[in-house]
Image (tube, rainbow, N blue to C red):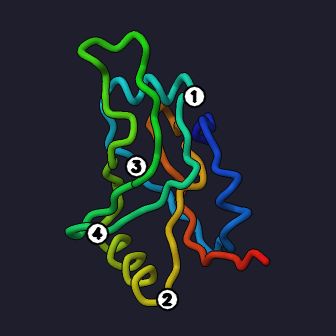
Amino acid sequence: MPAVKVVATNRKARHEYEITETIEAGLVLKGSEVKSLRAGLVNLKDSYVQFRGGEAWLVGCHISPYSFARGGGHDPDRDRKLLLHRREISRIGAKVAERGLTLVALRVYFKDGIAKLELGLGRGRAHY
């Protein structure tokens, strides 16, 4: 059984969206970003996925700079590439484009030492 350590969750996403499907994706990160994740310095609020050029990108995720990083660390608000199979990207991208669904970040965790992101495919709820 793989060891899973949850780093951050987006509780707001489950409140604002009706999640119908969840997907696990890998993240392309820099070294200082991994250290910041391990320290829990991540904010998933208002983060979502965009599809550009046949690739999936995480937008709006804030990973605070690691305090001991040399050379200034990293840009905390940069877009991060997601690692998904091509057929997953095309299947999910078609659902998002066609049906008006949104792909939001639900939680970040380490699975056997590798950073993973749980994505939720859902429709926005009406707030009255």
How far apart marks 4 and 2 lie (CA) works out to 20 Å
Where is 57 relative to 76, above or below?
below
Mark 4: amino acid = Arg
Q: CA distance from mark 3 to mark 1?
A: 17 Å
Q: Residue at x 64, y 45 (%)?
A: 9
**Label located before the other in sequence (4 or 3):** 3
Q: Which residue is mark 3?
A: 26
What residue does disc 4 label? 86
Task: Give how far apart the Cα atoms at labels 1 and 4 are.
Answer: 30 Å
Of mark 3 and mark 1, the one earlier in the sequence is 3
Specify the quadrant that holds the N terminus: top right
Circle nearer the N terminus (2, 1): 1
Residue type beneath disc 3: Gly
According to the picture, the residue beneath numbered tag 1 turns out to be 40
Residue drawn at the location 33% of the way across and 43% of the way down: 78
- Are the residues at dot 2 and dot 3 in contact (C-beta closer than 8 Å)? no
Image-based side of 45 in relation to 66, left or right = right
First in residue order: circle 2 vs circle 3: 3
* C-alpha distance separating marks 2 and 1: 34 Å
Label ID, residue 99: 2
Q: Point out the residue furthest to the left here.
A: 53
Give the percent coordinates (x, y) of residue 93: 37, 77
In percent of width and height, residue 5 lies at: 61, 34
Residue at 34 percent across and 57 percent down: it is: 57
Observer-side mark, 3 or 1, equals 1
